[in-house]
Amino acid sequence: QVQLVQSGAEVKKPGASVKVSCKASGYTFTNYDITWVRQAPGQGLEWMGLISAYNGDTKYSQKVQGRVILTTDTSTTTAYMELRSLRSDDTAVYYCARDGSSGPDNWGQGTQVTVSS
Amino acid sequence: DIQMTQSPSSLSASVGDRVTITCRASQDISNYLAWFQQKSGKAPKSLIYAASRLQSGVPSKFSGSGSGTDFTLTISSLPPEDFATYYCQQYNSYPITFGQGTRLEIK
């Protein structure tokens, strides 16, 4: 069965970077994109960006563009989201999701990232 | 950016009720509309894509309709486990955008 397993919770200081991983299994990794979405405490869902696991093409939200880097490692079927220059308003749960012709269909369990001095 | 507006923002209903949630796009998105369910503290669950197509494994009590700018999600005969927050999302163009969510509560 399709599974996306994310890395564990992180606590970072303002200005630092964080890298969240998303290990995919149960499907052909390169046949799908990986979408990243975050959710600040008590808030709704915010799309951050998307990466093609086939060729590495990326699309980013303007809100985080310049601070976020999405990558994939096809040898380990793992996607990564790196967010730099962290601010307090980056505190959120970060989700990865498999994204194909039917949109995001399977989601990771989420990774809590807390930015605090 | 395309703005997605859901209504209502919150809704109280009883077990067994039929409920409808509306999502309006600020411009034509054809049928590039998805719906998600999120329970408290959990990851979103994908329900519907292409405005009306059920994701694999999603029961037929969920249905979606609409095209262009106006869309609806209907849940027939609400069981207790479907009290959650529901989000629409447009994927017609980047940046992909979500509605603000509709919180469905037990009356």
Image (cartoon, rainbow, N blue to C red):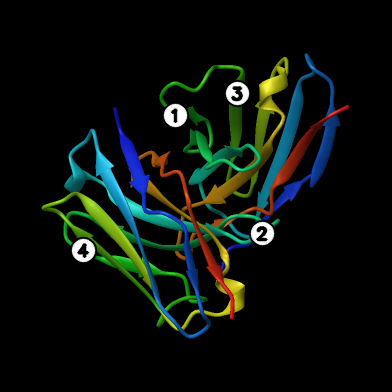
Q: Which residue is mark 1?
A: B55
Instruction: Point out the tag, 3 or 1, that comes first from the N-terminus.
Output: 1
Mark 4 residue crowding within 10 angstroms, few (<14) / some (14–19) / many (20+) = some
How far apart are labels 1 and 4 at the CA level? 26 Å
Counting from the top left corner in percent of width and height, residue B83 is at 72, 29
Q: Nearer the viewer, residue B36 or A67?
A: A67
Q: Quadrant of the C terminus of chain B?
A: top right
Residue drawn at (27%, 44%), measured in percent from left and top?
Answer: A24
How far apart are labels 2 and 4 at the CA level? 30 Å
To which chain does the residue with label 2 belong? A
Q: Report if the CB atoms under discs 2 and 1 are less than 8 Å apart.
A: no
Q: Which residue is mark 2?
A: A41
Of the residues shown, which amino acid type is indicated by label 3? Answer: Phe
Residue drawn at (74%, 31%), measured in percent from left and top?
Answer: B20
Element carrying mark 4: loop
Mark 2 residue crowding within 10 angstroms, few (<14) / some (14–19) / many (20+) = few
Q: Are marks 1 and 4 on the same chain?
A: no
Q: Which residue is mark 3?
A: B62
Q: Is residue A69 above or below residue A76?
A: below
Residue lying at the far left of the rendered structure: A75
Q: Nearer the viewer, mark 3 or mark 4?
A: 4
Q: Which residue is mark 4?
A: A56
Of the residues shown, which amino acid type is indicated by label 4? Answer: Gly
Element carrying mark 3: strand
Quick check: A59 left or right of A92? left
Element carrying mark 1: loop
